[in-house]
Amino acid sequence: MAENKLNTNDNNNNSSGNTVSDQLNSTINQTTSNVSVTTDKKKLRPCCACPMTKKIRDECIFEKGEDLCIDAIRKHNICLKDLGFIVDESI
């Protein structure tokens, strides 16, 4: 699976004209279609789920602070929920 590098700056568009929000939505769709939660001994853990949205969220928070990264945080939470995890809705 090829890794997509996503731009974390909300004001910049990539070469195809998609915004970071569009890229996050695409990443969520790709991640949820490629990962499944199993009932085997090797269960998917929240720390390992949604690696692309987690990376984008973490980089955004590190560079800009949590208050300016609400969209990235929500997108990561959506990805986690799509995989069956319970997510705190406080943000």
Image (cartoon, grey):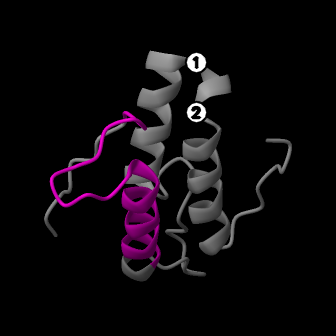
Residue 30 included in the magenta stretch of the image:
yes
Name of the residue lying farthest toward the right:
90
Amino acid beneath label 1: Gly
Disc ID at residue 69: 2
Which residue appears at 36% of the width and 37% of the height? Answer: 8
Task: Characterize the local packing of mark 1: few (<14), some (14-19) or many (20 or more) Cα atoms within 10 angstroms.
Answer: few
Q: Residue at x 70, y 64 (%)?
A: 85
The picture places residue 19, in percent across and down from the top left corner, at: 37, 53
Question: What is the secondary structure assignment of the residue under circle 2?
Answer: loop
**Mark 1 residue element:** loop
| Left or right: 74 in relation to 45 | right
Q: Position of residue 64 (x, y in %)?
A: 51, 18
Residue under the image location 41 percent in, 61 percent down: 22
Residue on which disc 1 sits: 65
Residue 53 has which mark?
Answer: none
Which contiguous range is marked in magenta?
9-32
| Quadrant in which the C terminus appears | top right
Image quarter of the N terminus: bottom left
Q: Are marks 1 and 2 in contact (CB under 8 Å)?
A: yes
Residue type highlighted by circle 2? Cys
